Image (cartoon, rainbow, N blue to C red):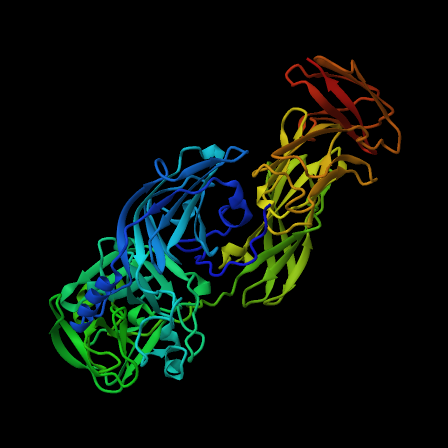
Amino acid sequence: MRTTLLAVICCLIASPTIAQVAFGGMPWGIGARAEKLPRVPQVVLPEVDAAQLIEEDLAKVDAGIKGPFRFGFNHVTDIRTERDGIWYALPNGDRVWRVAIHCPEAYAINLKFTTYRMPEGARLFVYNTAGQHLGAFTAQSSPGRDRMAVGQLPGDRVVIEYHEPAAQFGQGELVIGQVTHAYRDVFGLMRDLGDSGPCNINVICPEGDDWRDEIRTVAIITTGGNGFCTGTLMNNCAGDSIPYFLTAHHCLSDDVEDWVFRFNWDSPTCDPTENGPIDQTVAGCELLVDNNPTDMAFLRLSSIPPPEYNVNWAGWDKRDIAATSAVGIHHPSGDIKKISRTDGALVQADIDLGTGTADCWRVSVWDAGTTEPGSSGSALWNQDKRVVGQLYGGAANCDNSVDDYYGRLSTSWPLLEEYLGTCGDTLDGLNVPVVVPINWDAAVTSIVNVPALVCDEDTISPIITIKNNGLVQLNTVAITYQVTGQPSNTVFWTGTLQPGQTVNHPLPDIEVPSGELTLMVSSSAPNGNEDQVPENDLWDLAFVVSTPGQAVQFDLVLDDFGTDITWELMTDSATVIHSGGPYTDGDAGDTLSTAFCLTYACYTFTINDAFGDGICCENGEGSYTIGVPDGAVLVESDGQYGAQDVQEFCLEEVGVPESSSGGHMRLFPNPATGRVVLQLNGINGPAKVVLRDSAGRIIMQQAVQADPSRLELDLNGFAAGVYHVQVHHTRGRIGQRLILQR
C-alpha cells in the first residue's frame, strides 16, 4: 500500500535560474512506491581513517595554512548506468535505474557525475535513508556541460535514482566518477554547527550591523568535492552584475570548474547559532586568472545568482594604501558565516606559508573574532568598505588571534584590470540594480472576453488592458493583433492615461476558424515614441474554437499519486484532440474539471497510470466521468483499471442551429463515396459553404450566389469519416451531417 510522504527534513535544491538547478518532484524510492521497485544493489566503498585525516589537517593548521578546510575523503569510482545498479521497466514503457552507495561511518556524502548526459524529459534524484533528497535534476541542471557535481546529503548511504522516458530509451548515460566521504560533521548533526572556535561571531550579531551589504557578497565554496574555502562577488566598472568572484590561489583544485558556491549560509540568530538556508547555490565556474605571488584566484561563476538570493557585489580599492582598520567575512572551519574586525592599521609584509612567498597585508591582531581553515580566500575590507585583499593564511585562532596575511589587491591589480575595468582607483559595491528612468512604456497586461473554449461560435470580441508604465502621460498607443494563421491588424488607442493607470480597450470582432488558436496582442509607439521596455509589450491568449460543437465536461477525482496519471481523447480517425496529466501528488479527493467542445462523432478516451495500479482504491477513492450539461453520462469509471482504461462513446445530437428565417439544404448521396450534390432552397442573397471534419476544423469553403442553388462537392481526396456541411447566409446558418465511405 502506498502512502504520501508527510515531510522532507531538508531538501537541498537550487533555484531554476542557476547552473545546478533542481526542478522538484519526488523519487519513487521514497515512501510506499519503493515497495514496488526491486531491491536496490549497493556499492560499498572502503572505510576511511578519519583520525589520521584529522591529524593531517591539524598539522596544516599548526603551519598557519588556512585552507581549504578539508571535511571529506574523495573516493575515485566508476559507477555506470550501463553496467551497475538495476533497471526497472514501468507499465508505460518508461524505466528507472537505481544504485545505492554506502560510505561506512560517513557523516555525509556528496558525489560527482563525470559523465552526465540527460535526454529531454529524464530526471535524476539523490536521496538518503532519512527521506531527504536532492533533485529532480534534468538536462537543464547542467546546461552546455556533460558533467555535474551534487552537494552533500547527511548520512552514510545514498541512493541515485534515474528516470528515463520510453521515447528516449537508451539515450541517457551517467558515470559517478567521485564519491566524497565526509569524515567531519558538516551539518552539525552530532554537535553545534561547524568546528570553528568559540570566539567567532555570527554575521547576524551587532558586529555585522554596519556590514549588511558586504555580508551578502560572500559565499562558502566546496572545492574539489572535499574541502571548504570562502570567496566574494566583485563589482566591476560597468556595474553589470557579471559574477566575478575573488578567492585564494591555494584553494584551487584540478576540478575548479565543478566547484559549488553557497550564498547566505548565515545563522538567523546571534546566540545560539542556528542553521541557515543551504539551497542558495551556484554550481560551476571558469578560472579567469590566478597569481601565486599574491595567492589570488579570480573566477567567473557559471551564472548570476538569481534575484531571490538577494546578493551584492563588493567594491574595491586598488591603491597601495594601508587601511586604518579592516573587517573580514568568512566561513571558518566550513562553519556558518562569521565576521572579524581589527581596529589597527594594516601592515605590508611578505610571508611564505608553504606555497611560496606572497605579497600581503598583515592583520596584526583581531579585536573581534578570528579566522581559521575554511576562511581562506575570504576578502578583507578597509574602513571605506572596499576590498583590499584575500586571505592567504596565518597563525590567528581563538587562543591567540594575531598575524593573519591577505594577498594585496594592489599587487594583483594588473591581472584583474581586464575584468574589473578602468574607472579609477576605487569602486563602491553594487547593492541595487542601476535604474534608468522610463518615460515611454505602454504595456498590454491582459486579454479578456475570450473564453478558453469557444463552442459553436465563429467570432470573438476581445477586450485588452493597456497600462502606462512610463513616467509621461500617454495619449496614443498602436495596438497590433493577430490570430494564428491570419494576417495581423493594427488599431490605435487614443485618450488620456496617466503614469501607472490602466484602461480597457475593445478590439474589433475577429472571425476565427475551428482549432487550437492563439490571439497575440502587442503595444508600440507610445505617443509616437519608441517603447523603452519592449519586454512587456506582448500578451497572448490561447483558446480553442469548435464549431459546430456540444459542451462536454470531464471530471477527474485524483488519488494520492497524480504524477502517475495521464489521459487523452481521440477522434474516430485517431487524432488526439485533448490530453492531460501528469498531476501533483498528495491531492487525493480533489476533482479536476476539463471542458470540451465536441462535434457529432465517436471518440476514444484513454487514461493511463504509470505505476500500473489505477486510481482507486488503496491510494485514494479516484474516479472519472464524462458527461453533457443535461446530466447525461457518456463515460464513467470507479478508477480500478490497472495500467490503462480505454472507453469509447459517441455524440448523437450535436448539430448546427437552423436559421430562424428558414432555408433548407439537402445532401445526396449520403453516405457518399466521392462526389456530393448540395441543394439549397429558401436562401436569399450570397452564402458561404463550409466543410468541417470531425474535429471541427475547416477543410473546404466556397461562395454560393444563386437561389435556388445546386453545388457539387468533390470529396475524392478526403479520408472516410464523419463531416459537417454548413451554409452561412445573411440571416443565419444551417447544417447537415455527411458520412464519407471508402
Q: Residue at x 57, y 45 (%)?
A: 563
Q: Which residue is drawn at 22% across and 53% down?
A: 254
Q: Nearer the viewer, residue 472 or 700?
A: 700
Q: In this view, does 237 lie to the left or right of 633?
A: left
Q: Residue at x 66, y 60 (%)?
A: 503
The quadrant of the rendering that contains the N terminus is top right
Q: Is residue 385 left or right of residue 652?
A: left
Is 446 situated above or below 655? below
Q: Is residue 407 visible?
A: no
Q: Where is residue 462 in the image (x, y as percent from the top left)?
A: 69, 48
The quadrant of the rendering that contains the C terminus is top right
Quarter of the view holding residue 444: bottom right
Quarter of the view holding residue 613: top right
Q: Position of residue 728 (x, y in %)?
A: 78, 30
Q: Where is residue 392 in the image (x, y as percent from the top left)?
A: 20, 70
Q: Position of residue 698 (x, y in %)?
A: 67, 29
Q: Is residue 362 left or right of residue 165?
A: left
Is 671 situated above or below 414? above
Q: Can residue 451 be seen in this view?
A: yes
